[in-house]
Image (cartoon, grey):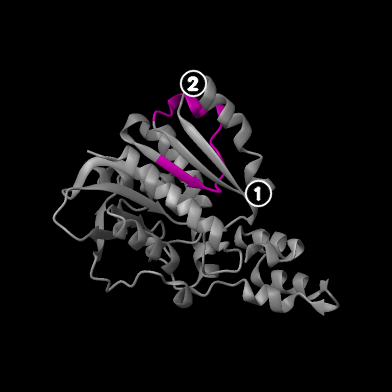
Amino acid sequence: MSNKIDPRVAQLYDQYCHGAIDRREFMRRCAALSIGGMSALTMATSMLPQYAKAQTISFTDERITPRYVEYPSPGGTSGTMKGYLVQPKGQGPFPAVLVIHENRGLNPHIEDVARRAAVAGFLALAPDGLAPVGGYPGNDDEGREMQGKLDQPKLRQDMVNSAKYLKAHALSNGRLGAVGFCWGGSVVGHLAVTLGDELDAGVPFYGPAPTAEEAGKVKSPLLIQLASNDERVNGSWPAFEAALKNHKVSYTTHVYVNTNHGFHNNSTPRYDEAAAKLAWERTIAFFKEHLKA
């Protein structure tokens, strides 16, 4: 689906998603574009997320047990965090996977991704970085604004603490993986640098890379998932990959042809079904390989 989006609209949507312009400006600029003699406004409107239609695993699915949990987060935004914990069917212990949201808090799409991970056999925790300030507000615009106003080092510490909480959970087998999208993808890199060998596998989806100087601190294998039409993010990876190679860190990079930033998110037309399916299959296989007890 993503290759049907006019590149100019996709670029404007990327600016909107990352806070460079607000929704009104996004719509105004799209309305000024002409695609085949027609306004791009309809295409722009269709790009806004439709979470209810995008749900793939119901929260009542018999294969999982989801619940919200609270846990301490010293050094974070408020000292306390909340997350969406999804347990696979069975008694455990299970390999654990942290699922990290984009730049707008724990929205319904990321909760659905956590359920997908649990259906695949992993104890999944999706932390809500907005929990200390009231939680995801129910819409992405307000969520993006709230997250942008947070103290970013403290927010990242909340994610580090979430990873440690999950790794030590009674239902965890002690093996920890992390997958994140956009901002969450950058957090996977931060966790790899910060946690060292406490992280057993990391899968960043189209998030900016850490600096090359930090690569020597990475001990976990990485599966790097990138969109081909994402120059802003992709430009950050070559230097880091070279440094990983120099430090003999195991990593694999996949660049999905003719895809846009956000291609895994099935709630917007940036979604590319074939690429998203393949990327998720690779993600699950990677975790199964590295998170065995």
Query: Can residue 282 be seen in the rendering of this structure?
Result: yes
Q: Which of 281 and 111 is in front in this view?
A: 281
**Disc 2 residue crowd, few under 14, some 14–19, many 20+, Cα 10 Å:** some
* Magenta part of the chain: 202-219
Amino acid type at circle 1 is Ser
For the N terminus, the image quarter is bottom right
Is 24 on the left or on the right of 182, as rendered? right
Q: Which residue is drawn at 57% across and 31% down?
A: 240
Is 226 on the left or on the right of 180, as rendered? right
Q: Residue at x 55, y 25 (%)?
A: 243
Quadrant position of residue 75: top left
Q: Which residue lies furthest to the right in this view?
A: 37
Q: What element carries label 1?
A: strand
Find residue 228 and name its label.
1
What is the distance, in whole Å, between disc 1 and disc 2 at their CAs? 26 Å
Q: Which residue lies furthest to the left in this view?
A: 91
Residue at which label 2 appears = 247
For the C terminus, the image quarter is top left
Q: Is residue 182 above or below residue 198?
A: below
Find residue 268 and name its label.
none
**Disc 1 residue crowd, few under 14, some 14–19, many 20+, Cα 10 Å:** some
Whether pointer 1 and pointer 2 mark residues with C-beta atoms closer than 8 Å, the reply is no
Quadrant position of residue 273: bottom right
Q: Residue at x 71, y 59 (%)?
A: 11
Q: Position of residue 228 (x, y in %)?
A: 65, 49
Q: Residue at x 42, y 33 (%)?
A: 221
Q: What element carries label 2?
A: loop
Q: In this view, does 8 lie above or below 284?
A: below
Residue 213 magenta-highlighted: yes
Q: Position of residue 125 (x, y in %)?
A: 31, 55
